[in-house]
Image (tube, rainbow, N blue to C red):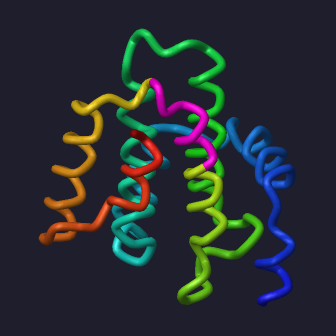
């Protein structure tokens, strides 16, 4: 599996993200989060929520929406570069896709969005989740 992890590159993630945009829907996203949120972990869920709440802003440009929809669609898909069911590494490619999208839309992620996402993960996980890995990229 290590070779598969090493072979993941940004170009491949970008291609898969753009193809996966058509798989996005609010219902599918919330169903996946309810079913697999704990397994995916707080950091992955935080990234998903940041993108989801950013998508809800009415002022978001179409290109930004497409980036977000591609990343969230990729997260929803069970068949991606690394299957989600693999313990410990199943969500690494999802986090990579989500992180790449967050980096591209960072200027649209404001404090209100971060606060909403943190409140939701604290509700779900019942503890303070360390979001610094993502938050540092948003400064």
Q: Is 125 on the left-hand or right-hand side of 100?
A: left
Which image quarter: residue 90?
bottom right
Q: Is the C terminus in the top left, top right, bottom left or bottom right quadrant?
A: top left
Measured along the vertical axis of the image, is residue 74 above or below residue 114?
below
Q: Which residues are magenta?
A: 100-107
Residue lying at 55% horizontally and 89% vertically, measured from the top left: 87
Q: Count every numbered label the image shows and give the total.
A: 0
Instruction: Tell me the chief SS of the magenta region.
Output: helix
Residue lying at 64% horizontally and 53% vertically, measured from the top left: 97
Residue lying at 58% horizontally and 55% vertically, measured from the top left: 75
Measured along the vertical axis of the image, is residue 43 above or below residue 61?
below
Q: Is the N terminus in the top left, top right, bottom left or bottom right quadrant?
A: bottom right
Where does the image place residue 22, in percent across and percent down from the top left? 69, 36
Residue lying at 65% horizontally and 19% vertically, measured from the top left: 63
Residue toward you, 116 or 104: 104
Measured along the vertical axis of the image, is residue 122 above or below residue 127?
above
Which image quarter: residue 24?
top right
Residue toward you, 47 or 26: 47
Where does the image place residue 96, in percent across and percent down from the top left? 63, 59
Residue toward you, 1 or 31: 1
Q: Is 11 on the left-hand or right-hand side of 91?
A: right
Where does the image place residue 57, in percent across and percent down from the top left? 37, 19
Q: Is residue 137 a member of the stretch shown in magenta? A: no
Q: Is 116 on the left-hand or right-hand side of 45?
A: left
């Amino acid at each position: 599996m290590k070779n598969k992890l090493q072979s993941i590159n940004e170009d491949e993630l970008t291609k898969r993200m753009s193809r996966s945009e058509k798989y996005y829907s609010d219902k599918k996203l919330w169903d996946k989060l309810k079913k697999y949120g704990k397994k995916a972990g707080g950091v992955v869920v935080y990234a998903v929520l940041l993108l989801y709440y950013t998508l809800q802003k009415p002022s978001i440009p179409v290109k930004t929406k497409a980036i977000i929809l591609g990343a969230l669609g990729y997260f929803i898909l069970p068949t991606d570069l690394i299957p989600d069911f693999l313990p410990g590494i199943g969500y690494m490619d999802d986090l990579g896709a989500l992180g790449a999208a967050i980096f591209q839309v960072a200027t649209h992620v404001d404090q209100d969005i971060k606060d909403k996402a943190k409140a939701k993960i604290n509700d779900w996980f019942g503890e303070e989740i360390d979001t610094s890995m993502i938050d540092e990229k948003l400064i």
